[in-house]
Amino acid sequence: MTQENQKIIALQNQVDQLRQQLAQAQKLTSLGELMSTTTHEFNNVLMSVINYAKMGLRHKDDATRVKSFEKILAAGQRAARITQCILGMARNRSDNFESTDMKAIVEDALVLLEREMRKYRVAVERDYHSVPPAMANGNQIQQVLLNLLTNARQAMPRGGTVTIRLSYDEKAETVDLMVRDSGQGIPPEKLPHIFDPYFTTKDGPDASGKGGTGLGLSACRDIIEAHNGRVRVQSTIGRGTAFTIKLPVVKAPVPAPGVTLPAGMPTGSSETA
């Protein structure tokens, strides 16, 4: 082996190590932002429980006490939903891909961000079409979705609308997840670079402590590409930005003659178009 080849191999090893370090940094950033989100959510729930419990103790009339109990019950039910989402993510910590209900992934993400969206006056519109299961890692896709939803919220500092659309591209055999905001849009000269590591259009983390590292979209792209999927972005200044994730659907074996597969279950190879 020549000295030149040894240098090339050494450089390739360094690149691989740097990629691993970057991937770890991306995971830690996502974990930190998720912990920040859930901590705020639980704190808000606990404050509701405490305040309505105090109100029920102060007032002796039945109407006030019933109202207090109803509010405490609602807060407790919300805490249970948040706990279920977190436990679901904790149980699935593997890197395996499996049949994934994308609607459930979206709804779990919205549970975690519901109060944050209301705080920043962001309305969420759901546009769900019938879709087959995607072949995906639920935790990783939820990381991508939380990042895209947070970016959408930050793009609308005075409030606006986020549209989440689920559809099935039968020709490409993909489940398509679109997140569109009505924000300020991304300048054309910056659009080609938004997936570059450490590139950011933000000045730094916002008041919620999120964003500004330039790791988010880079990590999203890496996750989607690892799923043999694709991510597309369209943006118009003054009208907003739309990210579309295309994930391969779960494929069933080609049935034997006379065997009928369940409706909506694609057949064929696992390659994407």
Image (cartoon, rainbow, N blue to C red):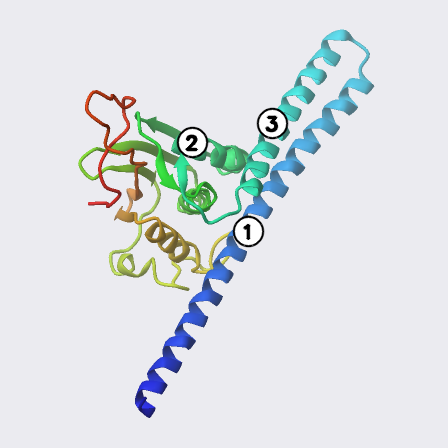
Quadrant in which residue 135 is drawn: top left
Q: Which mark is residue 31?
A: 1
**What residue sits 55% from the left and 48% below the top?**
208
Helix, strand or loop under label 1: helix
**Around disc 3, counting alpha carbons within 10 Å, would you say few (fewer than 14), some (14 to 19), or many (20 or more)?**
some
**Around disc 1, counting alpha carbons within 10 Å, would you say few (fewer than 14), some (14 to 19), or many (20 or more)?**
few
Q: Which mark is in front, 3 or 2?
A: 3
**What residue sits 44% from the left and 30% below the top?**
104
Where is residue 36? Give x, y as percent.
Answer: 59, 47
Which residue corresponds to mark 3?
78
**Amino acid on which the number 2 mark rests in the picture:** Ala
Residue found at the very far front of the displayed protein: 257
Which residue corresponds to mark 2?
123
The quadrant the C terminus occupies is top left
176 and 113: which one is in front? 176
Helix, strand or loop under label 3: helix
Q: Which mark is in front, 3 or 1?
A: 1
**Amino acid on which the number 3 mark rests in the picture:** Arg
Q: Which mark is residue 220?
A: none
**Amino acid on which the number 1 mark rests in the picture:** Leu
